[in-house]
Image (cartoon, rainbow, N blue to C red):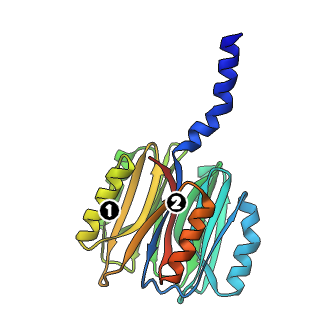
Amino acid sequence: MIRIVNRVILILCFPMIIWADFFFTGVLTKDTGYTKQRLVSKSKLLHLDREIREGWKEGYVITDISHAPRRWSVVLSQKRGVQKQLYMSRRLISDFKKAVHYYLEEGYEIVNVENGVGEWIAVFEKGGDYRSTGLNVTRSWEETDKIIRQRKKLGFHLIDMEAEEGYWVVLFAKVTPFDTELYTRVEGWKALEKRIEKAWKDGYHIANMEYGGNEWFLLFTKGNQNVSQRYIRSRKFKQFRQAVQDAWQKGYRLTDLGEGRR
């Protein structure tokens, strides 16, 4: 009887254990060219659709989209240049790749990839900062790293990545608003902070922070302009949103949205 009770307690407490070290992350940057921003969050991806479409009508575009347990969030920003934008989702990676190929053939550029609750999401646009974009899907980091190096020799830059469901999905572009990039993987938040500090000292800024498989993937870029950056994290989304709003008042814009664990 005691064993049964202990098992029931463990089952009930398991979600609390999982959430104990979970937090939301955000990268805030100055001089982005984004005049205004919105941070919209819903429990389901479908529920974001109306907010996104209304934002498009008002001159906003998707600049990031992210999934956390029981929460989809999208960053909508007012920026110049983007003439048209759309997003699509597919459950099977094979269908996702076919859809990406279709939109690339239609003249769109793929600029963002995300995965959540079995859905692969891609954001496409015309007239933005990226040209000659493409996607590669692999099954291991070793294969992914090899492809990144091969693409770099051909003049392509890494612009986004997502590792979920046993796949590594990476996006490339030949024309970008930055000159060079570097990437690395680290384990633990302390190691992440040290790596960021070093990159900042070397003149790079954070382009992407992704968490998966108990490690962090960091993408840094460097351009002609030095920018001011900071990052935030919070266990509660309400506090995270408030920190973002406070940063907006100081001229920062949310340029990367994510989540992770220690």
Type of amino acid under label 1: Ile
Which residue, given by chain and number where applicable, does mark 1 sit on?
Answer: 196
Q: Residue at x 52, y 60 (%)?
A: 258
The x, y position of residue 99, in whole percent, is 62, 62
The x, y position of residue 261, in whole percent, is 48, 47
Q: Residue at x 47, y 79 (%)?
A: 252
Which residue, given by chain and number where applicable, does mark 2 sit on?
Answer: 258
- Secondary structure of the residue carrying tag 2 is strand
Type of amino acid under label 2: Gly
Q: Residue at x 27, y 66 (%)?
A: 199
**Residue extending furthest toward the left:** 202
**Mark earlier in primary sequence (1, 2):** 1
Reply above or below: 73 against 91. below
Q: Which one is in front, 153 or 221?
A: 221
The x, y position of residue 232, in whole percent, is 46, 64
Quadrant assignment for the N terminus: top right
Q: Quadrant of residue 172?
A: bottom left
- Secondary structure of the residue carrying tag 1 is helix
The x, y position of residue 92, in whole percent, is 64, 49
